[in-house]
Amino acid sequence: MQHLLTLENLDRPSIMRLLDRAEQFRARGAARSLLAGRTVLTLFFEPSTRTRTSFVLAAKRLGADTLNFDLSHSSTVKGESLLDTLHTLEAMHLDALVVRHNENGMPAYLAAHAHTKVAIVNAGDGTHAHPTQGLLDVLTIRQRRPDFEHLKVTICGDIRHSRVTRSDVQALHTLGVRDIRLCAPAAMLPETLDGFPGCSTSEDFDRAIAGADVAMMLRIQKERMAAAQFPAAADYHAHYGLTARRLTLAAPGCQVLHPGPINRGIEIAPDVADGPQSRILDQVANGVAVRMAVLAELVGPAA
Amino acid sequence: MQHLLTLENLDRPSIMRLLDRAEQFRARGAARSLLAGRTVLTLFFEPSTRTRTSFVLAAKRLGADTLNFDLSHSSTVKGESLLDTLHTLEAMHLDALVVRHNENGMPAYLAAHAHTKVAIVNAGDGTHAHPTQGLLDVLTIRQRRPDFEHLKVTICGDIRHSRVTRSDVQALHTLGVRDIRLCAPAAMLPETLDGFPGCSTSEDFDRAIAGADVAMMLRIQKERMAAAQFPAAADYHAHYGLTARRLTLAAPGCQVLHPGPINRGIEIAPDVADGPQSRILDQVANGVAVRMAVLAELVGPAA
Amino acid sequence: MQHLLTLENLDRPSIMRLLDRAEQFRARGAARSLLAGRTVLTLFFEPSTRTRTSFVLAAKRLGADTLNFDLSHSSTVKGESLLDTLHTLEAMHLDALVVRHNENGMPAYLAAHAHTKVAIVNAGDGTHAHPTQGLLDVLTIRQRRPDFEHLKVTICGDIRHSRVTRSDVQALHTLGVRDIRLCAPAAMLPETLDGFPGCSTSEDFDRAIAGADVAMMLRIQKERMAAAQFPAAADYHAHYGLTARRLTLAAPGCQVLHPGPINRGIEIAPDVADGPQSRILDQVANGVAVRMAVLAELVGPAA
């Protein structure tokens, strides 16, 4: 593994090894010497303080030097010169480059054009992939339900534009989940199920959540709600919000996930977000551990 | 001590212990291992590069990992989701959270709702408190005059809106100062002396500074001067600026303090700010040491 | 050496010692203990993510604590209070202050007014100097051609406003280069050759590059092209761009340098920038090494 660009081709043993390593980091911490002297740079073309902070903490806890490349001040961030930025950063000797970009495939493009052995980590690209989110989600699920082949998983929200869903589905499918239900208003369902192995779709959240072992809620953008004919957030909540009532339709102990930040009262009711079935804060903690595992795997000494 | 939110209830031995520890750090530095592996995050809702830098340096010099949470890029900084931001950061495992906010009581609100043992350090909240400023001010005074019970202290400026004054007064009173004179134009005096133990008020700076052992000047906001009927800075300076002439009214060796950044020629004359009685740069140096002491006390191993 | 403000008065042995040390850092890395416990702060009044990143990496790789002083949030960045900012930062105990400013001489002004032994490193001031760029450029040249006294060097671009050129010329002249050709449209040539020892000027790039061993291209500002009567970038490129054809006029193996970021197709053709004679990425790598050498020299223990 040189880069982490997508979960599409990551096999089950590779995923399991990363999850196991993340669990070890959560349980016992990490040696600060693991990435001592290595440099990890974050390059975010879309703002995300949370995800960036999670990666930076992961790198620091492994002993790496960390830098944020501040694009608001950079003269070389647009169009054709992006590769010049990459090669300049490589010439300063980077070990890992954590990239977020609003265009699909930009991290892969950088990986394809790198001159050095720098590890490119995709921290979210367009609607394409968010592989560390996929990994932290399956880690979270596994902590209570390692029997993936028996799970029913419902993912609800703006599936069509969701890189989180694509990475989640790939990880879940690889780990053996057979019943993945994508639920959204029609305008937010994908136009095709290509790239969504093992998935079915539904516009009816009550039906989609029936018997589910896991409910993964997605953050909704206000402008997208309007385009999907939900002019008021309350309308969206009534049809696609996860409420305590709806959660009773799921299997007992159904785990509730959300990639954050949550819109309380829109895609999720506050009492569900804060309730005993919520794994949302576990996801955050697992996020740091998964990113440590990924960086250790890509940049660290051979295990 | 789990948090540092105010100096209101900090007793004399606790303050003295923090000041002694700060003096030790100034004299001999600190072991980088003291906070090794700990994470200190700064969360500033009001900009203050100076105070943030002082805290970050303090944390680094104790060996902690430091992060600035950049609110300008954050999707979760407003209104009801502030607690979600707190809990998300806690889930990433923080040891200390240094908070500045323009609303009174926000650090205490976060402390009351924290899920973990994270230490909340108030770096200034509204007009309420700025406890590390209070501590560094009494440390500075003590270096030349440890006999607090004999001191006359004059504080001059926009007392009403000053969190610095509230914390200074609490620390001075606890350490035994009996004669604290708050001086300002009427519109900048507090409406009541509740919360200002041991204080008297005056609108006449010449009288207020007579015989003072310490003159603490406050930074004045231009918009506040106008509201207090000083349309021109020169008018304010004539009445409430600390000039060399006025300083001769104070006791010999009167120490001059200012929390910075100073408005030269407005609340303080340049020759006084730069003169032999000025402790302003000592305050800055003491600020780093006090913040080291606070972080070591809250987050470090038991002494 | 206490500061690095310009290369004007740096003698040949001093430059050679810095270059040798930089080569050692490139070859063998540095002990992280070299600047352990030291604090290096960057203070950039002009944005330059690249240069700042290069300095920060250099400091981190020597084990120093690094901070960026974020001026966009600072209350004390303008006019007369700049010295107050300096003295405040010094009071927090800085070992080195890396300064970029759009006014000529500002780093020297700060050095002249410093209260402490803080090392001021000029990271570019106005049109005056960019000494670490000068050093990294001669280091790059020396790696292939250490026989400076035999070299013909052509520098092409907006010479008049170029701090890079001034520092390059000083370093080249000190190291023995006798034939330095400054090439630009008339409006971009210096009004006098004072400060450009060993230089001749030309408006004809084909003539200026004939037989050159080194071609140093400068980044061109679009607004400056228009003022020099090149309304379209293509016009500038036709007259002053380094193309493959023009490079054949130079000596075989002529080294191509550019301080970056490059404007592809304007001052340099893409195939030249990416071609075998390009040293542009070597310059970037050498930049980190040179800045390590400078910081080690100024702030580190006596060698």
Image (tube, coloured by chain):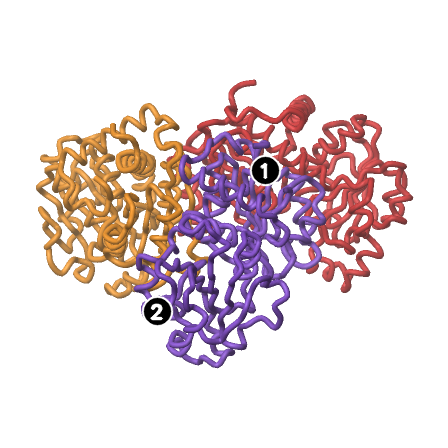
Chain colours: A orange, B red, C purple
How crowded is the residue under tag 2: few (<14 C-alpha within 10 Å), some, or many (20+)? some
Judging depth in this view, the residue of C168 and C127 nearest the camera is C168
Q: Position of residue B168 (x, y in %)?
A: 71, 37
Residue ID for mark 2: C243
Classify A234 as above or below B250: below
For the C terminus of chain B, the quadrant is top right
- Chain containing the residue with disc 2: C
Residue A233 appears in view = no
Amino acid bearing label 2 = Thr
Q: Residue, x 26% and y 46% (percent of image)?
A: A243
Q: Residue at x 78, y 26 (%)?
A: B146
Amino acid type of the residue tagged 1 in the rendering: Val
Q: What is the x, y in percent for residue C67?
A: 53, 43
Task: Quote the CA–CA distance across marks 2 and 1.
Answer: 42 Å
Q: Nearer the viewer, residue A281 or A125?
A: A125
Chain of the residue displaying label 1: C
- Residue B213 appears left or right of B4: right
Mark 1, residue position: C299
* B147 horizontally vs C108: left or right: right
Q: Secondary structure at mark 1?
A: helix
- Specify few, some or many for label 1: CA neighbours under 10 Å numbering under 14, 14-19, or 20 or more: many
Q: Position of residue A116 (x, y in %)?
A: 29, 46
